[in-house]
């Protein structure tokens, strides 16, 4: 498990670094970024996984969210994986919502995706082992968050790996992929025609089967252009109510789906994780 | 003076907006961005001008510095002009350090630059009039700041327009353009062979002629790749000492020339401006 350093910058007293490695899960090269806070100089720190949305890679959240300031204050490491395998040898689709940049945080079983698209194994097994081996990370204290498709990833991986993450939150997540166009297109391509496996990657279905005692934090922009067709947070609220799952869904009038929205509220999310992970005030 | 709205986003309770207009000074279309804080709903707010460095436009600082959070708290409007005129009809150079993206905040007198490159008139006359007409800006309270070439702009425009700006600060500024390669190339192209006019745009020369009673704040990364050849903050420190100009130059080991550096310290700069402009705590 060797890492190739790509870039490294001083940031808020800590370090933002970008790395390449050969991924077994994704059968090819992958790139990710880590923000290491200053507290890591004196011992391992908790890790928050940030899963990005369609088309994004590590740079969107690291450049635009301002997370480093708060992570530096609280002593949180933040890891931002890519949203899929990429490259000439990797299958792709003309749409921005399938294939490269759109891995949907699951392991594909269907051609032509199965050889490379194993983002669940990558994010929950291979990358954590790599981070544990190469960074001062306390892997007994992990949280997970994400945006849009990455909010879907954060919620579903949290339910599918109970006990792994102490805390979970999402910005404008896809909560019901079996019921919305983005999700139906991806689930059909990666897992085949509608089948029970779809429900294994739908936060609304997963919470009904096995709720947790975590308080889930969700922020949603009221002027989000994808709100009514693709996101539908009311479906998750209803499912949580039925299942007895604690959840807070905050709606913010005027905010859209962009990183201007995320930047405005990411401090609250990192403080939400810090409380569960036992750092900060 | 009509404005064409390009984009608008909710951000930290305020609004980030991008606008096009036909510039008389630059003889063609220009684009700029304004962060309007929530306090502007109830009355005019002070304005801080942010001048960007080589190659940049409005988006670098607005996307990567995180300024909106602090400007929102303090009640500061921040305006980010482009770094030059741009377009097919505008002269350019193969280098990134001359022509489009490299206006150096002066009015060019030489061919082929003179017809469009009047960034001093643009930033100090035309754009302020436009902002005063279209935004809830208190033009009696202005500050100016910038990065690299924009730090040069902030310092020189402050000295060249005494009384205009209550506060001034810079990140990794070019302080002695008559003595460093970036500056010499630009001054020669825009103003002709070495001549007294060069000194009119050199912060080290200007401060000797007419120091102010402002406390100038400068942050400089210790690992800045341009420190020794292009920036040379020690020359400005020496000139300020000679002239009796108050200045604070902070050196930050490990930080480079990037927006990761700027983001780490921009809060201090905005608070510096806020104090002089009479807002915040």
Image (cartoon, coloured by chain):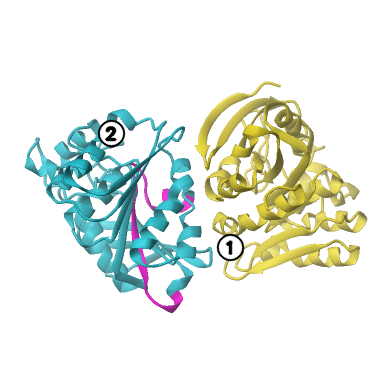
Chain colours: A cyan, B yellow
Decide if residue A132 is on the left or right side of residue B64: left
Q: Mark 1 Cα within 10 Å, few/some/many (few <14, many 20+)?
A: many
The image position of residue B143, as x and y in percent, is 74, 46
| Magenta extent | A41-63
User: Is disc 2 in the same subunit as disc 1?
Assistant: no
Evaluate if marks 2 and 1 touch, with contact meaning CB atoms under 8 Å apart: no
The image position of residue A280, as x and y in percent, is 44, 66
Relative to B45, residue A271 above or below: below
Q: CA distance from mark 2 to mark 1?
A: 43 Å
Relative to B245, residue A263 above or below: above
Tell me, for residue B104, which label it has, or none. none
**Which residue occupies 60% across, 40% down?**
B58
Quarter of the C terminus of chain A within the rendering: bottom left
Quarter of the N terminus of chain A within the rendering: bottom left
Decide if residue B205 is on the left or right side of residue A238: right
Label 1: element kind: loop
The image position of residue B108, as x and y in percent, is 79, 38
| Residue that numbered label 2 is attached to | A232
| Residue that numbered label 1 is attached to | B256
Report whether residue B196 is seen. Answer: yes
């Amino acid at each position: 498990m060797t890492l190739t350093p790509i870039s490294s910058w001083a940031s808020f007293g800590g370090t933002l670094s970008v790395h390449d490695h050969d991924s077994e899960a994704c059968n090819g090269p992958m790139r990710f970024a880590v923000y290491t806070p200053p507290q890591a100089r004196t011992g391992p720190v908790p890790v928050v996984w940030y899963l990005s949305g369609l088309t994004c890679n590590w740079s969107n959240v690291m450049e635009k969210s301002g997370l480093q300031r708060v992570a530096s204050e609280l002593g949180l490491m933040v890891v931002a994986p890519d949203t899929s395998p990429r490259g000439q040898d990797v299958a792709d689709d003309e749409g921005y919502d399938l294939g490269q940049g759109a891995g949907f945080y699951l392991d594909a079983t269907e051609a032509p995706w199965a050889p490379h698209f194993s983002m669940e194994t990558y994010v929950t097994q291979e990358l954590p082992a790599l981070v544990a081996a190469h960074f001062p990370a306390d892997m007994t204290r992990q949280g997970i968050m994400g945006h849009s498709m990455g909010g879907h990833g954060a919620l579903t991986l949290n339910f599918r790996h109970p006990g792994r993450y102490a805390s979970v939150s999402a910005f404008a997540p896809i909560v019901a992929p079996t019921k919305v166009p983005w999700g139906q297109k991806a689930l059909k391509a990666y897992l085949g025609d509608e089948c029970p496996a779809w429900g294994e990657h739908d936060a609304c279905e997963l919470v009904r089967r096995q709720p947790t005692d975590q308080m889930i934090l969700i922020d949603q922009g009221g002027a989000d252009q994808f709100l009514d067709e693709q996101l539908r947070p009311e479906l998750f609220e209803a499912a949580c109510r039925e299942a007895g799952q604690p959840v807070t869904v905050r709606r913010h009038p005027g905010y859209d789906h962009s990183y201007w929205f995320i930047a405005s509220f990411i401090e609250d999310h990192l403080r939400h994780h810090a409380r569960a992970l036992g750092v900060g005030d």
